[in-house]
Amino acid sequence: MHTPGDVAYFERFARHYERFMPSTDERALRAGLALAERDIERVVDVGGGTGRAVRTIDVPERIVVDAAHGMLGEARRLGLDGVRADGASLPFADESMDSVLIVDALHHVADRAGALAEATRVLRPGGVLVCREFDRATLRGRALVAAEHLVGFDSEFFTPEELAAGVENAGLDAAVPSRGFGYTVAGVKR
């Protein structure tokens, strides 16, 4: 799912990830989830690392998908189900999820269009994809882009409008429930 260099970094950093990363913006995540047109009982957190995003919501089934084995080990240690896979090739049946989360991860994904298409494929009708990202057009966003490239990441960031267009192209009805440096784009499957 992540570009090869990014996966290697997350493998090395996995044991310390929870200590150094900011917590998930639970309010913004819930604003995206509120757009679902069905009850949310089964959620997959794509590129979810340790599962910090999916842990903020209380649903019966929470699954973390990540390419970094070390990150999945941490997610499992925290009580979550974890699957090592690429976001552009999810190991789930068609229409098997009520929600797909991609939080602070899409900018690391090598095949972004493929990951959005897979999210669409696994969503049930009325289900919602919720993407949390960072706006490269903001001052903080430009600084983040520079910092991630300095570290060696192959990150590609988007504006909310660019990500919403990608979600629409994947076949979902897109909305932007929150804006700013950190923003949310949600897509509902009809």
Image (spheres, rainbow, N blue to C red):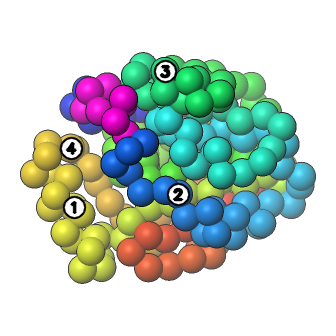
Indicate whether residue 7 is drawn in magenta.
no
Q: Label 2 belongs to which residue?
A: 24
Mark number displayed over residue 145: 1
Q: Earlier in the sequence, mark 1 or mark 3?
A: 3
Mark number displayed over residue 18: none
Gap between marks 4 and 2, in whole Å? 21 Å
Instruction: Please report contact status of discs 4 and 3: CB closer than 8 Å, yes or no.
Output: no
Q: Is residue 70 left or right of residue 50?
A: left
Gap between marks 4 and 1, in whole Å? 9 Å
Q: Is residue 131 left or right of residue 112?
A: right
10 Å neighbourhood of mark 1: few (<14), some, or many (≥20)? many
Residue type highlighted by circle 1: Val
The image quadrant that residue 60 belongs to is: top right
Residue 20 in view of the camera: yes
Closer to us: mark 4 or mark 2?
2
Gap between marks 1 and 3, in whole Å? 28 Å
Q: Residue 70 in the image: x percent, y percent? A: 40, 22
Start and end of the magenta stretch? 9-17
Mark number displayed over residue 153: 4
Q: Quadrant of the N terminus?
A: top left
Instruction: Please report contact status of discs 1 and 3: CB closer than 8 Å, yes or no.
Output: no
Q: Is residue 182 left or right of residue 151?
A: right
Residue type highlighted by circle 4: Phe
- In this rendering, the answer to whether 101 lies above or below 140 is above
Residue type highlighted by circle 2: Thr
Q: Secondary structure at mark 1?
A: helix
Indicate whether residue 15 is drawn in magenta.
yes
Closer to us: mark 2 or mark 1?
2
Residue 161 in view of the camera: no
